[in-house]
Amino acid sequence: MRFTRLTTVFVLVGFLAACADAQNAPKQTIGTLLGAGAGALLGSKVGGGKGRLAAVAIGALGGAWLGSEVGKSMDDVDRMKANQTQNAALETNRDGAASTWSNPNNGHRGSVTPIRTYESAGQNCREYQHQVTIGGNSETVVGTACRQPDGTWRVNESARAPS
């Protein structure tokens, strides 16, 4: 029980610190939060019982750090190209088919690959991988997104793909 509380405190402190700095470095904050969520999701797939909780905490903290580093390096053009490519890939690509983006101004690039399509609560959803390469360092985020009634795709942590 003590380990659970300590882990919760560390994760909350990390999120609060990221939010407190959101006005000064929004792209780093977004990267931190997305990285923490992805790390926690990946950590939840490991172990069982207290081991799973530890994996979630380690995954969240590690993902937050990696996401922070990637987010800090992305500029507005990178984010625009990444978002456009992700939306187009989710809308039109078959599972396993990648779409790529690149920013010729700084050499940053990425690819988005839908992995699996499924239905959740009456919505079409897709699990995907988004790989970003900045300065020779690559990071991959796995996420899920569901198609909204207006045709947009919303990344949704609660709509996890069924096992």
Image (cartoon, grey):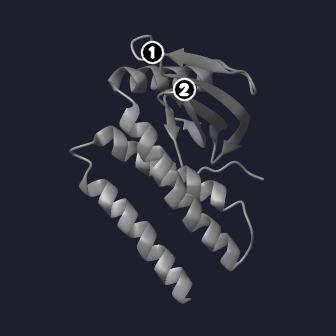
* Residue at 55%, 83% in the rendered image: 3
User: Which residue was labeled with disc 2?
Assistant: 86
Q: How many marks?
A: 2
The residue located at (21%, 44%) in the rendering is 24
Callout 2: 10 Å neighbours few (<14), some, many (20+)? Answer: many
Q: Amino acid at mark 1?
A: Asn
* 1 vs 2, front mark: 1
Residue 95 vs 101, above or below: the answer is below
Image quadrant in which the N terminus is located: bottom right
* Residue 91, horizontal then vertical, whole percent: 60, 23
Residue 48 location (% of width, % of height):
74, 73
The image quarter containing residue 71 is: top left
Residue at the outermost front position: 136
- The picture places residue 140, in percent across and down from the top left corner, at 60, 38
Report the amino acid beneath label 2.
Gln
The residue under label 1 is: 103
Residue 105, image x, y percentages: 39, 12
Judged left or right of residue 144, residue 21 is left
